[in-house]
Amino acid sequence: MNAFAISPQQAMSEILGRWPETIPVFIRYRMECVGCYLSTFDTLEEAAVAHHIPLDTLVEALNQEIDAQNRA
């Protein structure tokens, strides 16, 4: 796992800005967070709850995508 793992308490805008490679993960889960004005205010945890996605599953998928990009 990478040293800069995503935290459930991070703002969605921070995640999307810092790790743009996570965008396909959000799209895969049908989360419309990319470009949403609420991404500035919502945390990853709040977005997962709002979209009925298990938080641990989402965090794992996001961190795996970041790790894959770092290895490429």
Image: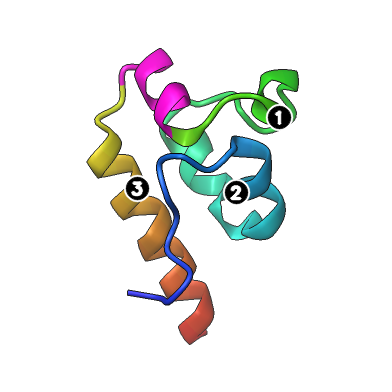
Q: Which mark is residue 40?
A: 1
Rendering coords of residue 51 (x, y %): 40, 17
Q: Tell me the crowding category of disc 2: few under 14, some 14 to 19, or many 20 or more residues within 10 angstroms, Cα based.
A: some
Q: Tell me the crowding category of disc 1: few under 14, some 14 to 19, or many 20 or more residues within 10 angstroms, Cα based.
A: few
For the residue pair 51 and 42, the one nearer the viewer reads as 42
Q: Residue at x 51, y 26 (%)?
A: 31
Q: Residue furthest front?
A: 9
The CA span between labels 3 and 1 is 18 Å
Residue 54, relative to residue 19: is it above or below?
Answer: above
For the residue pair 39 and 29, the one nearer the viewer reads as 39
Quarter of the figure with the N terminus: bottom left
The CA span between labels 2 and 3 is 11 Å
> Identity of the amino acid at label 3?
Val
Rendering coords of residue 63 (x, y %): 39, 60
Q: Which mark is residue 59?
A: 3
Q: Earlier in the sequence, mark 2 or mark 3?
A: 2
Q: Which residues are magenta?
A: 45-52
Classify residue 29 as left or right of residue 22: left
